[in-house]
Image: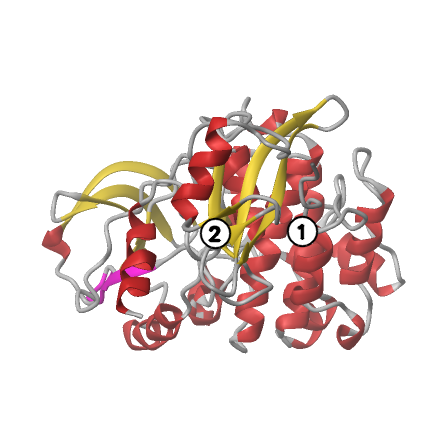
Amino acid sequence: PSNFVAQVDSLEEEKWYFKALSRKDAERLLLSSGNKVGSFLVRESETSKGAYSLSVRDSDSAHGDIIKHYRIRSLDGGGYYISPRTTFSSLPELIHHYSQKGDGLCQRLTTPCISLVPQRPWAQDEWEIPRESLKLVKKLGSGQFGEVWMGYYKNNIKVAVKTMKEGSMDPDAFLAEANLMKRLQHNKLVRLYAVVTKQPIYIVTEYMANGCLLDYLKTEEGSQLNLPKLIDMSAQVAEGMAYIERMNSIHRDLRAANILVSETLCCKIADFGLARIIENEYLAQEGAKFPIKWTAPEAINFGVFTIKSDVWSFGILLTEIITYGRIPYPGMTNPEVIRNLERGYRMPCPDMCPGELYNIILKCWRNKPEERPTFEYLQSVLEDFYTSTEQQYEAEPQQ
């Protein structure tokens, strides 16, 4: 086995090997800018343990650029093949062969998928940090509870820093919540790095170059995103929320303003858990802008927040995405929205919204919380919105 271990280790050195990448994220990466037809990667198979999949960018006249997946099968005596008529003793050998000629694949393999430069890992023990270790460089925005800055930690790690207005939260309650938030780690959640616990409280997170989704959808670039990309972004948010659901946590303030967008258009959920600890007195004195239009009726009326009230908010968020950031219930005041919902009114299907998507949205707005779908279900229907009819893998290349 020792030489086998070495072989697996050397795989990690290969530019085309993306170990634990999901099928969906492989498609997102290969379709991102910088890659072209023939770009490819190898990843561990999600469905069969110990097997691999080859993902290749292809193009056809009907669909434009698409990703095809091939199952790489193992031979009992060691070795690999995609088509049983041609077998290889190692994965690099297989890749080399299909880089020379397509040999039945949709494309000859040209260049490995461009890899995301991983952000510098954060030292686990650097949690409560001194304010002096942060340098705030550029103010990105301000809200009712504080400001957000782009900055640097120890002058070399680019971060986002949320500075909280004094009095907006009790430092002890905040630290308790932050310790919970720190436990939630997933690639569709904005990573919480560190905190400054003296007033004014600072929250240090990973930096997301394209800012919040609400603003991004209104930019020139964002307003040109096509429907499949909008649905893909929705699926990413659902994936992050499905993780929060599995962890028995809740968000409480899910909306496009709290989703952040990276330079590769990866969407991540921000500010999970913060809504709970904003001081009530502070809310009252600020005449707080409570996000009524995003809030489920049982949360408005009885203060009951659950993962199912998050599902309601997700339905509203889907309308924000599909309309490129239009305010929900256009032309209605908050009191009108509350009154209308009570008599069974629901926001009508937005102009550019496909009927199938509106049906998903309506499920999120069912009156009884327990009848609303899970985020696990929402993730799967949104990820497969266009592919529910396709096969998972391409057929083996024939002679």
* Quadrant of res 63: top right
Q: Is residue 316 above or below residue 152?
A: below
Rate crowding at label 1 as few (under 14), some (14 to 19) or many (20 or more) other CA atoms within 10 Å: many
Q: Which secondary structure dominates the residues rendered in magenta?
A: strand
Q: Is residue 59 magenta?
A: no
| Secondary structure category for the residue under label 2 | strand
Which residue lies under the disc numbered 1?
A: 383
Q: Is residue 325 visible?
A: no
Quarter that holds the N terminus: bottom left
Q: Label 1, secondary structure: give it.
A: helix
Res 322 quadrant in image = top right
Q: Is residue 393 visible?
A: yes
Residue under pointer 2: 43
Q: Position of residue 354 (x, y in %)?
A: 82, 40
Q: How far apart, in angstroms, are the residues tagged by discs 1 and 2?
A: 19 Å
Q: Where residue 27 sits in the image (x, y, percent)?
A: 57, 42
Q: Which mark is residue 185?
A: none
Q: State the residue at coordinates (84%, 57%).
A: 340
First-in-chain label (1 vs 2): 2
Query: How many numbered circles does the render carry?
Result: 2
Q: Quadrant of the C terminus?
A: top right
Indicate left or right for 122 with 313 as reference.
left
Question: Does 76 appear above or below 360?
Answer: below
Q: In the rendered structure, are the residues bearing label 1 and label 2 in contact, judged by CB atoms less than 8 Å apart?
A: no
Q: Nearer the viewer, residue 326 or 83?
A: 83
Q: Residue 348 placed where, x, y %? A: 85, 45
Kind of residue indicated by mark 1: Glu
Residue 175 location (% of width, % of height): 30, 73
The type of residue carrying mark 2 is Arg
Q: Which residues are magenta?
A: 192-199
